[in-house]
Image (spheres, rainbow, N blue to C red):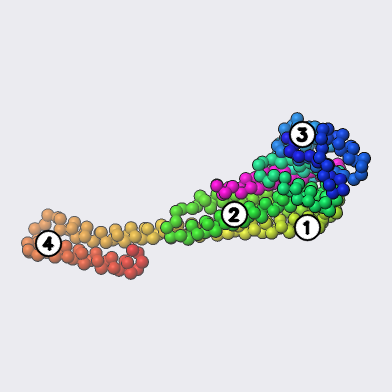
Amino acid sequence: MIVDKAIYARGTRRDIEGDISDAFDLARQDGDCFLWIGMFEPDEAEFELVRDELELHPLAAEDAVSAHQRPKLERYDDTLFIVLKTLTYIDATSDIEVGEIMLFLGRDFAVTVRHGAGNPLGPARGRLEESPELLQHGAAAVLYAVCDEVVDRYGLVAHEVEVDIIGLERAVFDPGARDVTADIYSLKREVLEFRGAEDPLVPVMQEIVKGRVPECGSTREYFRDVLDHLLRVDEQVDAHNELLNSVLNAHLALLGKRQNEDMRKISAWAAIIAVPTAIAGIYGMNFDHMPELHWTFGYPLVLGVMAVICVLLFRRLRRSGWL
């Protein structure tokens, strides 16, 4: 559905009432202007009206409706088609929810198609409308505002992921911690999904900054700022991935160490128990001639010997770190 539509001329907004085509034709007669239509998860019938009105390429229109595209920039005749991945951090589950924004950018129009609940474009439109000097750059200003909003959200999500990693580090090195292997792998999957959203966007921004997209020529300075932020996020995501690998290796090493300690303790107690078991087994045999067998103090003497040997073994094993 269409969530917002407006015509921007000379840095001011003009709301559209009624037919979009008629309003746009009238605005063109007054001078330079551009149309911005914002849509949220449209179906084919809804998007067909916009596609026919602005003569969008059928293949790009199909991608906009079906979604599930990788971040990219493509040209169809005189129209640019840009795909961005949006990210939203879910506090309750520590998951990263991925959405998409498709933009059609022409000489005098911009169409944004959003999929997923994350990254609503209302704030981006509001900030743009508060900057008449930026609106003077035309439809390219819409692409900048959307990219800036998306990349800013990347930075927020990267911070939340860093907090989660710090929490996992503390859990790993806590002596009484539970096994967090599954949590580490889960967060690693989220980080890889994060990389799949931001990493392909880097070459898209670089193409714009290098001046290879004429439609954005007057806004290159703005996109350079977006690229700087994006590269910073890209470095953070790489660092998070490496840190998670280190945390996982440390966790597995500590688990192995704890298992070895448990085995050593079991072996130590088995050695202590083996002494009285062996002596009791020998004296339990039906022999007539045994040391001190008929002596009154023979029984307590054997118990005492058992106790002394067990205590000596316990102290020796405790000193060596096995208990």
Q: Earlier in the sequence, mark 1 or mark 3?
A: 3
Q: Residue at point 81% right, 58% down?
A: 221
How far across and how far down the image is residue 50, in percent?
80, 35
Observer-side mark, 4 or 2, equals 2
Q: Nearer the viewer, residue 292 or 7?
A: 7
Amino acid on which the number 1 mark rests in the picture: Arg
Residue 224 is tagged as 1
Q: Position of residue 86 (x, y in %)?
A: 68, 47
Determine if the magenta segment contains residue 285. Answer: no
Residue 299 is marked as 4
Name the residue beneath numbered marker 3.
Answer: 47
Q: Amino acid at mark 3?
A: Phe
| Highlighted range, magenta | 77-101
Q: Is residue 293 above or below residue 15?
A: below
Which residue occupies 89% across, 40% down? 27
Assess disc 1: are there few (<14), some (14-19) or many (≥20) residues with their C-alpha within 10 Å of its C-alpha: some
Q: Nearer the viewer, residue 283 or 205?
A: 205
